[in-house]
Amino acid sequence: MAAVVFIVPSLRERALIKFDEVRAQIKYAINPPEKVIFEPQEQQIAAVVRQTMTALAPTATATILPSTPEPTMTPTITSTPLPGLVQLDGITFQSQRGMWNYCAPANLSMALSYWGYEDYILNIGRWLKPYSKDKNVMPYEMKAFTEEVAGLKAVIRVGGDLQTIKKFIANGFPVLVEKSEVLHGEYGPGSTGWMGHYMVFNGYDDVRRILIGQDSLSGPDATFSYDDLDRDWRGFNYLYMIIYPIEKEQQVYDLLGDQLDETANYEYAALKAANEVLGLSGRDQFFAYYNRGTNLVALQDYATAAQMFDEAFAIYPNIPEDDRPYRALWYQTGPYYAYFHTGRYWDVISLATTTLDAMSEPMLEESYYWRARANLALGDTAGAEKDLRLALKYHDDFAPAVQMLEEMGLK
């Protein structure tokens, strides 16, 4: 039976995932990750250079690695009343049950199926997650698969709201979002606490005040209250992705309106986060500061972004342990950018080490990459090389690590 399990790819994937879940449960029982606290140590050093860094900050441009080309078309602004009830058909539902950390392949598969692209979920998964136990797939990786493999187009924006989701659905476009989930072990060992989750919204009902979505965990046609949207979406900067065929590009640009321009989009999202900081507390306020930092990183205002992340991490110890988002750096790496580009290399190393040590199995290529950059900046070439090779162990073609090794003259 064991031989059969490891011969059949789908069974092997599930067996390895189950083993990883049990190992996570054991490690987390011994060393609860929610008790781990990161404390920035270099704020005073940063304060000395902050004024200079702010003065030297380049003109705002949105360039998160890897960068997304600016759209070449311009929107035609129109305003049309939205219907009160819409549900789009044509999505092939995919479940991730039995495949933990597989929400990205499952939900991308569903979003693509609406436009006629069908593929085996494990095929998509192997492209997105070269290492089967990779904890997270970044939105830009999903966009790359959409455009390079599926032959469709995709646009990613932040700062979304309910009206944005309804507008796209009403015009025939499902909306793929990244949002928070707080689980209590209901999906097996390791499924506890705050974590990220992708979901495809394809309908809404104003009378019942619900969004209708395809949730790879909960099931098809899952309902989601309007009242809960901000709370759960805030944890990911209100990020959304629209997939479409090339012939519908102008329509997508028209629907984006003034959010078409990436710089304007990040400026809008940064202001939204700043406004939220004032009226929130606890984990919600943590994410408001974190989102503002993320948006300022995209605008290359690294000095102010670092301040925002300092504020977020100062709030973190005051969040009840069961609510702490200790997986935040699995999904959003803005603090690494901000601290690195303000010369706070030890904070980069400390944050990456804290993040990796809190995992059941340290396998985040982004954390290894940024720790490598900080080590190299401090003159530790051997440490940088070790981390880059670990990054490639868990993502064997991770472009930033490959490029950095080449720049160091290494293979």
Image (cartoon, rainbow, N blue to C red):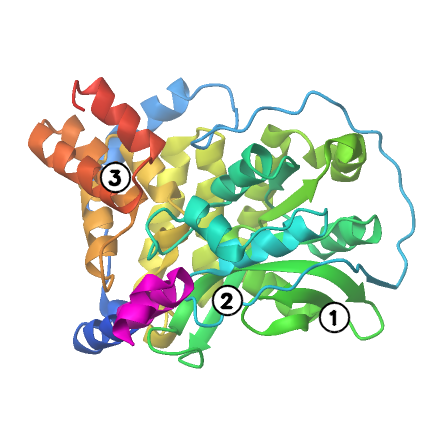
Q: Which residues are magenta?
A: 1-20
Residue depicted at 23% across the width and 47% down the height? 352
Q: Which residue is mark 3?
A: 392
* CA gap, disc 1 and disc 3: 42 Å
Which of pointers 1 and 2 lies earlier in the amino acid sequence? Answer: 2
Q: Is residue 149 left or right of residue 358?
A: right
Work out whether residue 59 or residue 359 is closer to the camera in this orientation and state it: 359
Q: Which mark is residue 210?
A: 1
**Residue 25 placed where, x, y %?**
26, 76
What amino acid is found at the position of numbered circle 3 in the picture? Leu
Label 1 neighbour load within 10 Å: few <14, some 14-19, many 20+: some
Q: Which mark is residue 367?
A: none
Which of pointers 1 and 3 lies earlier in the amino acid sequence? Answer: 1
**Residue 139 placed where, x, y %?**
51, 45
Work out whether residue 7 or residue 404 is closer to the camera in this orientation and state it: 7
* CA gap, disc 3 and disc 2: 26 Å
Where disc 3 sits, the SS reads: helix
Looking at the picture, does residue 75 appear above or below residue 133? above
What amino acid is found at the position of numbered circle 1 in the picture? Ile
Q: Is 7 covered by the magenta stretch?
A: yes
Q: Which residue is mark 2?
A: 96
What amino acid is found at the position of numbered circle 2 in the picture? Gln
Quadrant for the N terminus, please: bottom left
Quadrant for the C terminus, please: top left
**Residue 83 placed where, x, y %?**
90, 58
Q: Is residue 254 left or right of residue 351?
A: right
Label 2 neighbour load within 10 Å: few <14, some 14-19, many 20+: some
Looking at the picture, does residue 180 appear above or below residue 247? below
Residue depicted at 55% across the width and 67% down the height? 95
* CA gap, disc 1 and disc 2: 23 Å
How many circles with numbers are drawn on the protein?
A: 3
